[in-house]
Amino acid sequence: MPKNFEFLHPQFLWLLALIPLLVLWYLWVGNKGKARLKMGKTTGLYQTGSLLKKIRPFLNILRLLAITALIISLARPRNYSVSKKTKTNRGIDIVMAIDISASMLAKDLRPNRLEALKKVAIKFVNQRPNDRIGIVAYAGESYTKTPVTSDKDIIVRTINELKWGELEGGTAIGMGLGSAINRVKDSKAKSKVIILLTDGVNNSGFVDPVTAAEIAKDLEIKVYTIGLGTNGMAPFPVARRADGSLIFRNQPVEIDEKLLKSIAKETGGRYFRATSNTKLKEIYEEINKMEKTEIEEFKYYNYNEMYRFWVFLAGLLLLLELLLRFTVFRSFI
């Protein structure tokens, strides 16, 4: 059956099983009801009636075709097309506060922490077609890279452009969180979320992270925190060569998990630890599942009814059968 085609009342198609029975009935009645006439010479009769005799069963065929067409019309064949319209009932504004300090170049994630994050963050953005997203970058200070917007192309381009060296050195977690709060505090969205990612400890800035978390709680902003870095030692950039390339040395990974857990708990969010590329990907997928936008989908069906054609065809066949029966075959024995 072709796509987008259906029978509204397919149960009537079972009546088609009667057609073979009608065929047998016509054959039986036709043989039983044949008139027999004894004549001394029948040459003239066969010459005038032989053609009509051969095509007379065509009348029954017309009637069977008409009945078939009527049965199909009763089943209501029709084509249909479907148009969809979505309505977002519960929008979410999300700000991603991303650490771009020098330690984000550490190579415990491939090819380094920052590049691994950018890849996962872009995928996360593309999975949120109905939400507005903003980007805040921070190191020793913070600033807004992109205010909350529904333009995903701008957000993806902003994430791709994130790089180390744009800000003063250090890790100002409080300032990064504060800037993210400022981006969504006046939002009219039903849900406001911040995803705060860092790979270190708060050692810069003039905003206390605990105070920023309390403000987020008062404003009903949920904060998910992510500590990025493997357990143990990792190759960190420690100096730059004359040609501009970086020198890496193994150093212990230090993440203030106690602070990040406290921020998440205070605001009703969750803390995650990303120790590998795979784990980082799983974390963003989990956040994506937890923060869902409610969407209603409306489907509109447009029907093209085809039963009229079959009714017309049945009527035409019956008319043709009656016309032939009472004209050409009227006096035929």
Image (cartoon, grey):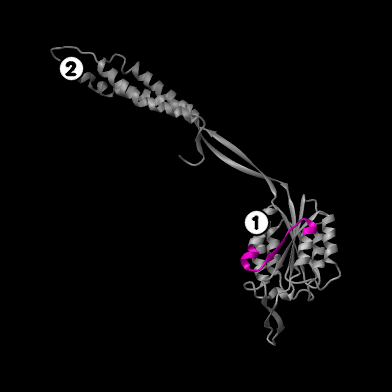
Residue at horizontal 75%, vertical 72%? 200
The amino acid pointed to by label 1 is: Gln
Residue furthest bottom as drawn: 242
Question: Residue 261 — which label?
Answer: none
Residue 309 shown in magenta: no
Residue 274 shown in magenta: yes
Residue position for label 2:
44
Residue position for label 1:
127
Note whether 22 is above or below 238 in the view shown: above
Q: Position of residue 105 (x, y in %)?
A: 69, 75
Q: Are marks 2 and 1 in contact (CB under 8 Å)?
A: no
Whole-angstrom CA distance, mark 2 to mark 1, is 87 Å
Task: Assign the C terminus to one quadrant of the image.
Answer: top left
Q: Is residue 39 left or right of residue 290?
A: left
Neighbours of disc 2 within 10 Å: few (<14), some (14-19), many (20+): few
Task: Give the magenta range.
Answer: 265-281
Q: Nearer the viewer, residue 171 or 57?
A: 171
Q: How many marks?
A: 2
SS of the residue at dot 2? helix
Neighbours of disc 1 within 10 Å: few (<14), some (14-19), many (20+): few
Q: Nearer the viewer, residue 309 or 280?
A: 280
Note whether 16 is above or below 113 in the view shown: above
The amino acid pointed to by label 2 is: Gly
Residue furthest left as drawn: 40
Q: Is residue 71 left or right of residue 259?
A: left
Q: Quadrant of residue 168?
A: bottom right
Q: Nearer the viewer, residue 287 or 262?
A: 262
Q: Position of residue 84 (x, y in %)?
A: 62, 43
Residue at horizontal 66%, vertical 63%? 122
Task: Assign the N terminus to one quadrant of the image.
Answer: top left
Q: Quadrant of residue 139?
A: bottom right
